Image: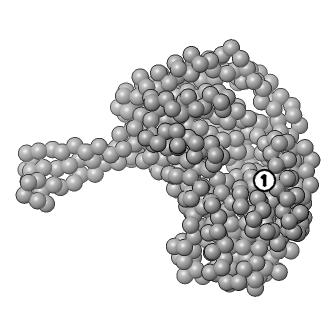
């Protein structure tokens, strides 16, 4: 097992390797060096891609039980090493360790689900063709086959689980994968490589390459990698799609998620629940989650009773050292990220927004913040803040609330607090998002469900089975001369 300050090798076609250069990974909390990482050379990257391409035909034909056993093994080993891995995530990412434990648990679920789906996934159906005379004696068999090797590009905010969402579905369908972790948080992905190396997966079927971002475009354009799965910023994601329009590209690009509180959600218990959930999930991960609550849109009839509860619950969030079990909100990924959040809040306040709590920065940490009366044209009202900042607004009625949710370039998920089942179905029909959560915040995600957005929140869907379908295509075989 490696120590926190050792130099970490990368994984080239399933084996450990080192390059000519290294870079340091530092803690956003205190700036200490968490580890040094070896950087692949151009020749080593080429070797990894060539190995993936060469391994693709054989891997696609690997028996399902072999792939399922490997995925089960990773799930078990993640469970056994949960505390170690959670501490590593917290150190490199700044995530409070209690949330990091949750991330490990989710990654366990991803690999477990992938193992189960591997055993039952064939994408196959049989189709009678004798519905017309010309099809007499013919039967179509439709199966799914891998498109080819996958390039998975993971972000910093969930360095283990969002790597799992690239790797596990690829292994499940028999597609080789090259994983590129975020430069700020490669250690979790490299540790995942340790667990993959313990399996019997064929050589060449996976690599973990911590290359700098400026070397990513050449990987994206490589024709031997026909599938690209990217989670990250909008500008980078859309540039990927524009550069390779003929590839299969999945983009999960974030949002500015809204929590709607409708008029019927009005009891003391209702408002206490909504306020606590909103406060927790506007600040968990330091607000650095694509489905963190960024906007609260409350019916005017409950607004005045709800907002003080939200402010009190936000102020009750414990900030500080992410390695402390009591900490709810740690630092952002970098001081530059915190300065950006600070500038957006300052811009909103200067334009007339009211600061109800927070609004202070200390290095990479930004205090949990609530803003009211935010002008519609300021940056924080239009863009994804990716920080612990929440805006609150009052509207008159359901129609206005849903219109406010849709008045955004983004559409990832929304939460609707209501007891009215008809309102729930209207929300599902009318809200321009990829997912609607009723009775809770938009921040809920089960890793087996389809997850992704519309508008500028991206294209395609993550979630184990849905990624497996994205990584494969249908191929038809027609059998002739059958006595059906």
Q: Can residue 243 be seen in this view?
A: yes
Nearer the observer, 414 or 393 = 393
**Could you say where residue 484 lies in the image, as x and y percent from the top left?**
10, 53
On-image quarter of the N terminus:
top right
**Could you say where residue 204 lies in the image, as x and y percent from the top left?**
48, 23
* Residue denoted by label 1: 387
Q: Which residue is drawn at 87% across and 69% down?
A: 352
Relative to 368, is 38 above or below?
A: above
**Image position of 12 (left or right of 370):** left
**Could you say where residue 409 lies in the image, as x and y percent from the top left?**
63, 61
Relative to 101, is 26 above or below?
A: above
Q: How many labels does the image show?
A: 1
**Image position of 209 (left or right of 86):** left
Q: Which residue is drawn at 64% across and 53% down?
A: 254
Nearer the observer, 462 or 230 = 230
Q: Residue 152 sits in which quadrant?
A: top right
Q: Can residue 67 be seen in this view?
A: no
Nearer the observer, 305 or 82 = 305
10 Å neighbourhood of mark 1: few (<14), some, or many (≥20)? Answer: many
Q: Residue at x 32, y 46 (%)?
A: 474
SS for tag 1?
Answer: loop
């Amino acid at each position: 097992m490696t120590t926190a300050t050792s130099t970490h090798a990368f994984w080239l076609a399933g084996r450990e390797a080192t390059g000519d250069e290294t870079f340091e990974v530092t803690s956003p909390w205190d700036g200490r060096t968490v580890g040094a990482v070896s950087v692949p050379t151009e020749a080593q990257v080429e070797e990894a891609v060539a190995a993936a391409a060469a391994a693709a035909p054989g891997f696609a034909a690997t028996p399902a039980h072999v792939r399922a056993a490997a995925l089960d093994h990773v799930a078990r080993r993640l469970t056994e090493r949960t505390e170690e891995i959670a501490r590593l995530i917290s150190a490199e990412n700044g995530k409070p360790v209690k949330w990091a434990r949750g991330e490990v648990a989710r990654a366990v679920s991803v690999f477990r689900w992938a193992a189960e789906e591997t055993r039952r996934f064939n994408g196959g159906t049989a189709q009678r063709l004798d519905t017309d005379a010309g099809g007499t004696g013919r039967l179509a068999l439709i199966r799914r086959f891998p498109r080819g090797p996958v390039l998975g590009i993971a972000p910093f905010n969930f360095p283990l689980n969002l790597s799992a969402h690239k790797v596990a579905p690829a292994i499940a369908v028999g597609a080789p994968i090259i994983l590129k972790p975020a430069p700020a948080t490669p250690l979790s992905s490299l540790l995942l490589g340790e667990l993959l190396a313990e399996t019997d997966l064929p050589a060449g079927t996976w690599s973990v390459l911590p290359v700098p971002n400026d070397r990513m475009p050449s990987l994206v354009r490589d024709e031997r990698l026909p599938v690209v799965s990217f989670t990250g910023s909008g500008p980078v994601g859309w540039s990927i799609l524009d550069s390779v329009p003929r590839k299969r590209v999945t983009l999960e690009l974030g949002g500015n998620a809204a929590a709607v509180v409708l008029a019927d959600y009005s009891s003391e218990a209702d408002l206490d629940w909504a306020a606590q959930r909103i406060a927790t999930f506007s600040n968990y991960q330091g607000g650095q989650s694509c489905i963190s609550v960024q906007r609260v849109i409350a019916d005017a009839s409950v607004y005045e009773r709800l907002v003080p509860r939200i402010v009190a619950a936000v102020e009750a969030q414990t900030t500080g050292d992410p390695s402390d079990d009591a900490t709810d909100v740690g630092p952002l990924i970098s001081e530059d990220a915190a300065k950006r959040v600070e500038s957006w809040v300052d811009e909103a306040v200067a334009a007339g927004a009211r600061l109800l709590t927070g609004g202070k920065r200390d290095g990479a940490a930004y205090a949990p913040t609530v803003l009211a009366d935010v002008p519609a044209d300021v940056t924080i009202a239009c863009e994804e803040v990716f920080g612990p900042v929440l805006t609150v607004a009052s509207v008159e009625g359901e129609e206005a609330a849903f219109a406010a949710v849709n008045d955004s370039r983004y559409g990832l998920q929304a939460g609707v607090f209501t007891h009215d089942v008809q309102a729930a179905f209207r929300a599902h029909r009318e809200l321009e998002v990829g997912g609607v959560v009723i009775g809770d915040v938009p921040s809920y995600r089960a890793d087996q469900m389809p997850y992704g957005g519309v508008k500028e929140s991206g294209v395609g869907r993550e979630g184990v089975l849905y990624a497996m379908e994205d990584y494969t295509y249908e191929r038809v075989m027609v059998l002739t001369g059958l006595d059906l």
